[in-house]
Image: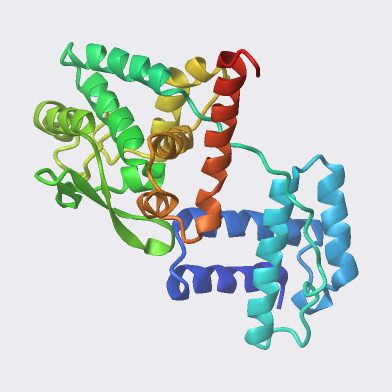
Amino acid sequence: MRISVATEKFLTHLAVVRRLSPATVRAYRSDLAELARSRGDGPLEDLDIEALRQWQWEATSAGLSKATAARRTSAVRAFFSWAREESLIETDPSARLTAPKRGRTLPVVATASALDEVLDAAAEQAGSGDAIAVRDHAILEVLYGSGTRVSELCGLDLDDIDHDNRTLRVRGKGDKERVVPYGVPAGRALDSYIVRARPVLNARADGAAGHAVFLGARGARLGPRAVHALVSRVVAPVVGAETLGPHALRHSAATHLLDGGADLRTVQEILGHASLGTTQIYTHVSGERLREAYRLAHPRA
């Protein structure tokens, strides 16, 4: 069986059996397509450890980051482990494949005061009554106020919102469902959007978006790219970055929760992390900010 044919079967397994998110399946597809391309899409059983190491070396020589190389290695291991279980191959050539160690990079976090300015400016623009400006203000408030992923935000339906308790029901990685709180400012912005702006956008597509909360300029369900462009346009300048994704607001929400005294387990639950170790990166960010404040303020620092 050719690599590409086996890959399609594996991707179906990921989506249907393991119920991984579409974004995760796309990442697997990209990594395994690169493997098939570089090895000439030959028979799966012809791949051995030396071929996989050659593939790794070529990627590293092309300037691939350690994080991306590690992700690709993980994808290949999962692929061959599945192939062995399905008896497509007799032995797993990836069993001895090692991934490069990832260097720790701290997430980009905006200060609370900087985000206050961003959100105040967005609120002022929303005051004009323009439907897109009202929507954008609600998006920024909800992303920062709830710490949700952009995919979770874009996947929200109207019945996922509990206005009385100010909570959202979101579906995260692996289609896992959780309930996250949001604050008073986010509640005001969200309610304003649903009453004032969503009907305007919804009418542009004759209601084709169904119960989707956030709609695009043409009335369809809003996609992650549009949210990325919004965050990059309004938040990136305040942290001195050329581009910045919605995850920066999630990073900022988590860090500010810890700065305010929230315990790690609570933050883990809000963010929907399967592992506490993933959440712990924010303790390093919070610690760095604490040390920097000490260095600037203490006369004996």
Q: Say whether residue 289 is left or right of residue 210.
A: right
Q: Is residue 12 above or below residue 263?
A: below
Q: Quadrant of the C terminus?
A: top right
Q: How many marks?
A: 0
Give the residue drawn at x 32%, y 43%: 153
Look at the image and name its color scheme.
rainbow
Give the residue drawn at x 61%, y 12%: 299
Q: Is residue 126 above or below residue 224?
A: above
Q: Say whether residue 183 is left or right of residue 87.
A: left
Q: Which quarter of the figure has residue 182?
A: top left
Toward the viewer: 46 or 249? 249
Q: Is residue 255 above or below residue 111?
A: below
Toward the viewer: 40 or 145? 145
Residue 104 placed where, x, y %?
A: 68, 43
Give the residue drawn at x 68%, y 62%: 74
Residue 92 placed where, x, y %?
A: 76, 79
Q: Residue furthest front?
A: 300
Toward the viewer: 40 or 176? 176
Residue 103 placed where, x, y %?
A: 73, 44
Give the residue drawn at x 83%, y 64%: 52
Toward the viewer: 91 or 268? 268
Q: Quadrant of the N terminus?
A: bottom right
Q: Is residue 69 above or below residue 139?
A: below
